[in-house]
Amino acid sequence: MTVTTGFQKNPSTGSLLGMKSNPLSTVKVDYAVTNRGDHFETALRIITLLIHLGFLVGLYIQVWQASMRLFQKPPDPCAPNPCRHDGLCLEGHNGYYCVCKEGWTGKNCTLNIDE
């Protein structure tokens, strides 16, 4: 890495000697990267933890939604009343059935039997 500095470099040892008459001289500096791997591992662990946390939050939401569907009462097949001509709607195994008033028949009490 090249750094602009006001120091002079000893050509034989590579150490910095002191101020030059020109305060803006260029010196090549080699930085020892001892902790760089540690920082990378820490960042990788944090990213992995965040991914797992996101997965767990997503899983929690899916379980919560499934439990809400499981314990939710099914919709009332008789609301609104599908039975016409004042027929009585009752819930059955496969939905609803109508108890029709006299003179009417059919699934929704729409067929006039008097005609």
Image: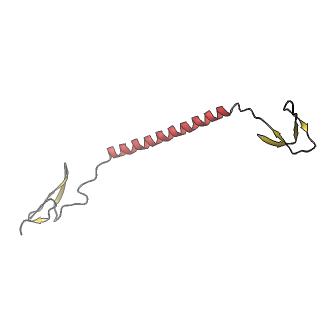
Q: Relative to residue 103, is residue 30 drawn left or right?
A: right
Q: Relative to residue 20, is residue 67 drawn left or right?
A: left
Residue at position x 32%, y 44% from top? 70
Furthest residue toward bottom: 115
Q: Nearer the viewer, residue 100 or 20?
A: 20
Q: Nearer the viewer, residue 65 or 100?
A: 65
In this rendering, is residue 52 above or below 105? above
Looking at the picture, how far across and down is residue 96, in whole percent? 19, 54
Residue at position x 63%, y 35% from top? 40
Question: Which of the image's four quarters has the C terminus?
Answer: bottom left
Residue at position x 17%, y 58% from top? 88
Residue at position x 71%, y 33% from top? 33
- Residue 49, quarter of picture: top right
- Residue 83, quarter of picture: bottom left
Looking at the picture, how far across and down is residue 89, in whole percent? 18, 57
Question: Which of the image's four quarters has the N terminus?
Answer: top right
In this rendering, is residue 63 above or below 74? above
